[in-house]
Amino acid sequence: MAIHSTDLSPTLRDRLDLFFARIGQGMNAYLESRTRSQQIAALEAKSDAELAQLGITRDRIVHYVFRDLIWA
């Protein structure tokens, strides 16, 4: 048999739940903003001529997208 007891009042429990939910939402927003898969997909959809105008080749798309993180 499991016994569950807590000294937290319902309002404090609700406030803690809201606090951690907001942290989770902030983390999700941060991680979504850091993803670059959409930019990679958009570049992969371009023709080789369009990529050449940008100064990149198809095999360097990932390097181009992450250039500020890796080669900065």
Image (cartoon, rainbow, N blue to C red):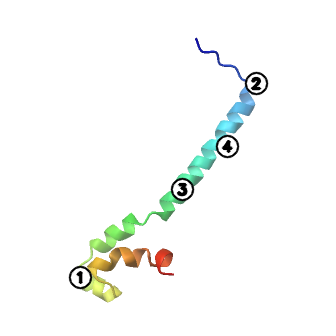
* Label 1 to label 2: alpha-carbon separation: 65 Å
Mark 4 crowd level (few <14, some 14–19, many ≥20, 10 Å Cα): few
- How far across and how far down the image is residue 53, in percent? 31, 88
The residue where tag 1 is placed is 48
Going from N to C along the chain, the mark reached first, 1 or 4, is: 4
Taking the image as shown, residue 59 lies to the left or right of residue 25, namely left
Tell me the SS state at disc 4.
helix
Image mark for residue 59:
none
The residue where tag 3 is placed is 29
Query: Circles 3 and 2: CB distance less than 8 Å?
Result: no
* Label 4 to label 3: alpha-carbon separation: 15 Å
* Label 1 to label 4: alpha-carbon separation: 48 Å
Tell me the SS state at disc 3.
helix
Image mark for residue 19:
4
Residue type at mark 2: give it.
Asp
- How far across and how far down the image is residue 6, in percent? 72, 23
* Label 3 to label 2: alpha-carbon separation: 33 Å
Task: Give me the residue at 38% from left, 64% from top.
Answer: 37
